[in-house]
Image (cartoon, rainbow, N blue to C red):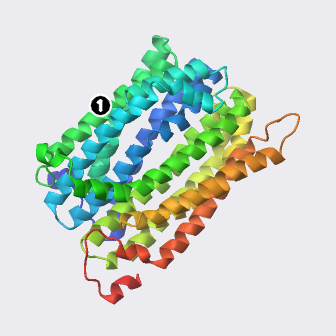
Amino acid sequence: MLKKFSSLFGAQDMTQGRPLSNLLRFSLPLIIGNFAQQMYATIDSIVVGRYIGDRALSAVGASMPVINLLLVLFMAIATGAGIMVAQYYGAKDRESLSKSVGNAITLLIMASLVITAIGVPYAGSLLRLTNTPVETYDMAKSYLTIIFWGILGPGIYNISSGVLRGLGNSTFPLLTLLLASVLNTLLDIWMVGSLGMGVAGAAVATIISQAVSAALCLWKLNSMKDVVEISRDTLKPDLKFARQLFRLGIPAGVTQAVFSMSMVLVQSLTNSMGYRVVTCNTAVMRIDGFAVMPSFTFGMAVATFVGQNIGANRFDRVAEGTKDALKLSLTTQVVLVSLILLFGGNLIRMFTTTEEIIALGTRQMRILSLGYLALAISQVFGSIMRGAGDTMPSMWISLITTTCVRVPVAYGLAWLTRSPANPNGAPESIFFSLLFAWITGAVANYLWYRRGTWKTKSLIKHRQPAEAFDA
């Protein structure tokens, strides 16, 4: 019993055993961990909305697209590191694995310095570019500036927890997130509710909690010396591994950059509709974060599964793992969509007591509900390709669905639905555009997966028998 319990905290070899069992064992703690991570933003929003009011909630929502835009470097490094770790671990190449991790940490620290240098002095300018409502501008700037000062914490957490997941260990990141989530809740209530620090208190609570989770994950990674070594030698920049990180990660970084830029453009459209619409969308997107969580979680699981099995030359297991991941993801999304349709209004009511905002939020969530099934399909097939090292298709698909679908449809529908009551367009246009983008992405990812070119993109070159590619 003790041995089985201890194994939860070590690396998980996903090249052995039933794929379904591998995916479940990896995904369940990850889902709980992602739930805890999503609670950071949600608790901030609930506390801010209830203790301060709708304008403060609008300020937090207006800040998020700007934060996400400047985090694209983290996304690139984390994605590249995750793929390299999974494949080198599957190949049992400890030296390359250690250098991959060390270079990822070094690049992450450099990226954090760049983000802070840009984000802190230009926070106000970035908010003005997105037409942040004047009623919420000062609060949004305060929140944004504090988050950028503490950006190293979430950066270190994302890298170290991503490496642990690449090694198959999703349990320890879960425990750190649960601890940090509880800490964040207590600090939120104390700083915002008791001390009256406003949105600044919510920001401080978030960065303190994330710093704690980062320190714990980094400590755990450093203690796994039988699997990976973090030392001066492995932290020293190595051109070979830096190139691999960027080759694998840049497509994801570009994807995130385009996605974040589209969110800034859509946020600008949303801001033009008034702070009540921004408040509504902030609440909806907090709930949406929980709804999309299983799709992204199973996507991370299948990417690690594929990476390890391709690294170990086990292509025969990939097809079975794909089917199991689809079943898990779609079944979970059907349940969540049903709950959203039944209880959407009650969920929005957690953030605000304004009936107009509650009614609008309920309509927005119904629009998004069908899109969650499309997102589940898109994430599974896209993650298979990323886990295999074929990251370019996902980049191009995201570019197309974002630039050619999401933004044009949002502005087009807003223009077509202008009225005296909504001079800048109906708020529903924002979420109809997201629905169309998700459906387009699901179709495109499936078609590219069927092409099969991802099967030849591994970092670990094997001689594959022809029948290995029939999966």
Residue farthest to the top? 195
Residue depicted at x 44% and y 51% = 253
User: How would you rate the neighbour count of disc 1 (Cα within 10 Å): few for under 14, some for 14-19, many for 20 or more?
Assistant: some
Quadrant where the image shows the N terminus: bottom left
Residue depicted at x 43% and y 71% = 322
- Rendered location of residue 347, percent (x, y): 61, 37
> Helix, strand, or loop for circle 1?
helix
Residue farthest to the bottom? 466
Q: Would residue 49 be visible to someone looking at this image?
A: yes
What residue did someone put label 1 on?
Answer: 212
Determine the image quadrant of residue 266: top right
Determine the image quadrant of residue 20: bottom left
249 lies above or below 415: below
Nearer to the camera, 418 or 468: 418
Amino acid of disc 1:
Val
97 lies above or below 452: above
